[in-house]
Image (cartoon, rainbow, N blue to C red):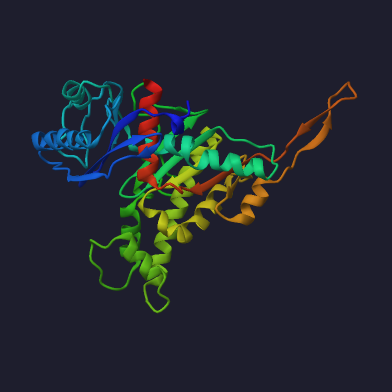
Amino acid sequence: MNIWNDKRVVLTLDAGGTNFVFSAMKSGEEIVEPIRKPSNADQLDLCLKTITDGFQEVLNLLSEKPVAISFAFPGPADYKNGIIGDLPNLSAFRGGVALGPMLEEKFSIPVFINNDGDLFAYGEALGGVLPAINKRLEEANSPKRYRNLIGVTLGTGFGGGLVHNNELFTGDNSIATEVWLTSSRVFPDRFAEEGVSTRAIQRTFLENAKGNYSNELMPKDVYDVAMDGTNTDQDAALKAFELFGRCLGDSLANLLTITDGIAVIGGGLTGAHDLYMPAALKEMNGNCYTASGESLPRLVQKVYNIDKDSEFKEFASDYSKDIQIPGTDKTIKYDPNPRLAVCFSKLGASKAIAIGAYAFALKNL
C-alpha cells in the first residue's frame, strides 16, 4: 500500500481535551484548512454535536466524497467497535459511548478510531522516521535495515504505539502498548507516567526549588530556569529534566528489550530534549546487576541518538566480518554489534497521527 499515490479522501480529527481539530487527507496530505472547535469535553450531548458538526463542515468544503472517517482518541477504549469508555481528559465519555457507530449512521461511511499513541507510531513507521532512517542507511552503504518501531509521546501523559513490518499492533482488546502503565525501576512504587510526564517535571522542580513558584508552572517555565545561569534554582530545574530523562530511558530500555526496533519520540516535551536525552541514553546504555552483584549491560543492543551526525555515522558503519562455516571452506557475513536508534519526530506528533489515521483507514478498506 502506497498512501502517497492513493487518491481516496479520508476525514480526520485530532481530538484533545480542550480542542478538536477537523481536517481531510488525500495522498497522505491535508487538503483543507483545519477547522478548530472547543471540545466541550464535560457535556456529552454538546461534545457529540461538536464532532458531527465539525465533520460536516469539512465535508462541505470537499468536492469529492470521502471513503471513511479515521481519527485518534486519547486513552484506552474498545476501538475495534468504535466504543469509547471512561476517559480522564474527556470527562463526558463515561460508561461506553458508541461514537463510531453513531458517525457511521450519520455519514454512511466506515469509521475507524484508534489510540493517539498507536497512530503516532503508525504514521512515523509509514511516512516518518522509519523510511527516512532506512533511506539514510542505504545512502551510507550500510547493510542494516529496520522494520520495527516503537513510538512514544511525551506531554501531559506518556503514550505509545508499536509497528512491526508496516503492521500496527493493536492487541486483542484494542489497548496494546499502554506504555504509561509500565513499571519504573527509578520509582518502583509508581507507574511509568509518574516519571515521564509534564507533572513529573513540575513535581521534581517544586520539591527542590528554593524560590516561590506557582503550582501551575509549565515545563517551559522550568526549562527557562534551567537555561538561566543567574537563577539560584537552575540546579533544581536541571535535576528535574535529568530525572525525567532517567525515567524515560528506563521505559525505553524496557520497550526496546521487547521490540528490538527503532524508537521515535514526539509530543510537547521534545523541545527540551537537550536537557533530558543525555540521561535517557545513559540509562539505556548503562548497566544492571545480578543478585551477586555482577554487572551486565542494560540492553543487548547499543542505542544511538541518530539526531547527532556523529552517532548516526557510527550507527550506520558496517561492522560485519567474514566467518567460516564449520566443516566447509565457505564463509558468511556476521555483524557482532547489534544496535538500535532513538530519534525525535520530524513530522511532529499531530501530522504523524493524521498520517497514521489516513493509512489505517485505507488499509482496512
At a point 74% along the width and 42% down the height, the residue shown is 319
Residue farthest along the bottom direction in this orientation: 230
Camera sees residue 122: yes
Judge left or right: residue 74 versus residue 159: left
Circle count:
0
Q: In which quarter of the image is the C terminus?
A: top left
Viewer-proximal residue among 82 and 291: 82
The furthest residue to the front = 63
Against 35, residue 53 (above or below) is above
Q: Which residue lies furthest to the right in this view?
A: 329
When the figure is inspected, residue 362 is found, relative to residue 58, above or below; the finding is above
Residue 138: name its quadrant: top right
Left or right relative to 291: residue 185: left
Does residue 75 appear to the left or right of 294 in the view shown?
Answer: left
x%, y% of residue 40?
13, 43
Foreground pick, 309 / 33: 33
Please determine whether, in this image, residue 34 is positioned above or below residue 333.
below
Q: Where is residue 86 in the image (x, y as percent from the top left)?
A: 20, 33
The residue sitting at 50% across, 36% down in the picture is 149
Q: In which quarter of the image is residue 152?
A: top left
Name the residue rendered at 22%, 40% in the picture.
88
Is residue 181 something that shows in the picture?
Answer: no
Give the image location of residue 300, x and y in percent: 62, 39
* 42 lies left or right of 246: left
Tell me where residue 180 appears, x and y as whole percent: 36, 40
